[in-house]
Amino acid sequence: MEEMVNVYLYGKQYTVPASLTIMEAFEYSGYQLVRGCGCRNGFCGACATIYRIKGENALHGCLACSTKVEDNMYVASIPFFPLEKKIYNIEEIKPTQEIMMQLYPEIYKCIGCNACTKACSQDLEVMQYIAYAQRGEYEKCAEASFDCVMCGICSSRCPAGISHPQVALLARRLTGKYIKPEAKHLTQRVEDIAEGKFDEAVADIMSKSVDELKEMYNNRDIEK
Amino acid sequence: MSTPYTDEMMESVKKVEATRASRIGAELRRMTAQEKDELLEAFHPDYNYDSFETITVGPNKGEKAPKELVNLLQADSRIKNLNIDLSNPKYDVDVLVIGGGGAGSSAAIEANEGGADVMIVTKLRIGDANTMMAEGGIQAADKENDSPRQHYLDVMGGGHFANVPELVKKLVTEGPAAVNWLDKLGVLFDKDENGNMITTHGGGTSRKRMHAAADYSGAEIMRVLRDEVFNRGIPVVDFTAAIELIKDSEGKAAGAVLKNMETGEIMVARAKTVIIATGGAGRLHYQGFPTSNHYGATADGLVLAYRAGARLLYQDTLQYHPTGVAFPAQIYGALVTEKVRSMGAQFCNKDGIAFMNPLETRDVAASGVIRECKERGNGVKTPLGEGIWLDSPMIDMIHGEGTLEKRLPGMLRMFLRYGIDMRKVPIVIYPTLHYQNGGIRITQDGMSDIENLYVAGEAVGGIHGRNRLMGNSLLDIIVFGRNAGQQASKKCKEVTLGELTLSHVDAFAKECADAGIESSLVSPQILPDYRRKDM
């Protein structure tokens, strides 16, 4: 007999197999999901969820697709959270400390409660990456926030009203565009293609018959 | 450490550990062309003829497709018996993009750049797409020892030379510019201290041209594209599905009928050009396979376009990714990125034998795994069925401790959630339905057979022939997504719409009726139904 547990979906009790994820528990109980379900594999952040085990104080944040049910779990999903996304032109802004002050000044109101970190579905050091953003250390912020799926649970717990995922995204884009060194080989290759340096070679291979292509393919050298 | 593996599995792990040191650095032989052909014919699911049916109506009449797709192509329209007022559209735009993944977002950005009034409509949220889940990377021939010509050869060989050459040319020659575009938007590619892109092999590549952002490559690209869509103020109508295309009196694409996923409201969007960027079909679970795809991958765009008269290409070829998760149950069918193999992990059978080169193309690798289990009986038995070991601890042994954590953080996290530390123990894999190789036929400008109907991304057929290489999908959504947006924004300036009509939907229904088809289904499917069946 399969082991079963009691879960409370939006407070209503259902009995489901203990092996299921929270998302599967919803479906097992008869929900046809529209919201709160995206990639089903921990990458998209659509299934932000908070839960509490009956009798315990701690409130947990998680992704419903990647978290197993537990007995006496009280579950509420947050299929949408109103994060504040500021509009900017990536070509015009620069990776200065001032840009964060202009766009997301509320990060300086962080009271250090660390509720964001505790709630993070990805176990990221959220408060720490906000501290990096405050100091204009965008590369560090980018690295510390890299696995963020933008589910927004952190922001739902923040007394200062910070939209952490948006702050982190800005830091990553600044890092990618302005702080990391240019890939010169890529710039060069784009120029060479634009100048037509590869046109002849491509036209030549396109003129080959399938048999000739097969011969070339089967005998091509493969970089070690 | 303790793992959820059974005792029998742990016995087998010991055998894998016993052979590991001798396998490191050993070059595994690649199959000959003939060996590959025989393997595919015997074990690839595309050759499982019982699972295909003949299409009996429409442009591809007489050709084969997976049963599930045929049933949807020939099902009833969702607007049957509805009285839709086309005279008063809720939305009226230059470019209507259907789908909010990487291709749709790239298209919208370029259409906006071209000065068009563009709108995205998506049945879930922008970014709920296979792009978000692409882990391994994006190919582009930008290194000294590489060239678009070399990339072309790999793409054609991987696709069994069935690819449309003009589309491949576009893919490989515009590849570096696509990666450069992303780089300039702020995508955080893996680079060394001098800015050189860190590139690796993928299955079937002859040069190391796989660019990555750890194992969040697609997620990182999608996050940035979505942010850019918002920065540009492009309207995104989410939780709204396109359920039929609308044409004008001259038979050109002219918009879509939309349905609010939550309220059920039916709306009309009129558009001078339409871009289908609806993605793949994994959630149709062809042949009962699990899938690595996102929740909305139900081939909607193929159904819409087909009913409107667009021809499909290679709709009978699917990609089964060799390394889907075979255990534990909670992530069954989820993707284990090919990058795990790129970085040195080998396939091992239950006896710890590395039975094939792990970097054969995906179709060959998947077929090799199936053969090892089904014919040779060397699969690893799990509580869910069987699979093959993917010897992930090799990665840190080859590249140094900490490498797996740094380069494959998503994978590590996914397995750790269920008590499996892939740095210490191998993981069990089996093929999973991953990619729709075929789709809607397009020309070089991205247009389908229907004038002003463009297609980009996984919904396109022909770029990858009969098998796609790793990293060429992230590339194609950018190259062809941008292209579709650019072309559509140019084209819309010369379009004068005639009267809107849905007569093609009626005509297709009549064709089905005349062919004696009585369907109990409606399509597009929009979402799968995973509710418990015995309720």
Image (spheres, coloured by chain):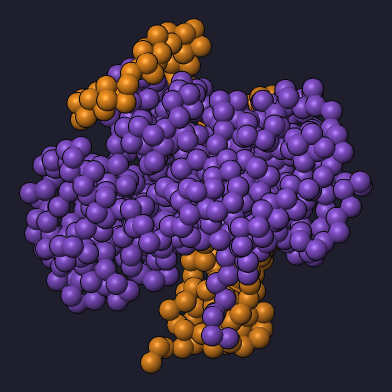
Chain colours: A orange, B purple
Q: Nearer the viewer, residue B354 or A124?
A: B354
Residue B203 sits in quarter: top left
Image spot of residue B470 (x, y percent): 38, 40
Q: How many marks?
A: 0
B90 relative to B486 in the view: left or right: right
Image quadrant containing the C terminus of chain B: bottom right
Q: Residue at x 33, y 67 (%)?
A: B327
The extreme right residue here reads: B88
Image spot of residue B413 (x, y percent): 40, 58
B418 relative to B271 in the view: left or right: left
The extreme bottom residue here reads: A1
Residue B102 sits in quarter: top right
Image spot of residue A42 (x, y percent): 50, 59
Image quadrant containing the N terminus of chain B: bottom left
Classify B466 as above or below B129: above
Q: Residue at x 7, y 49 (%)?
A: B22
Inspect this view and state whether residue B44 appears: yes
Q: Nearer the viewer, residue B367 or B84?
A: B84
Q: Residue at x 89, y 52 (%)?
A: B85
Classify B178 as above or below A35: above
Inspect this view and state whether residue B421 appears: no
Q: Nearer the viewer, residue B488 or B512?
A: B512
B149 relative to B346 in the view: left or right: right
Q: Residue at x 70, y 40 (%)?
A: B97
B173 relative to B340 in the view: left or right: right
Image spot of residue A112 (x, y percent): 62, 57
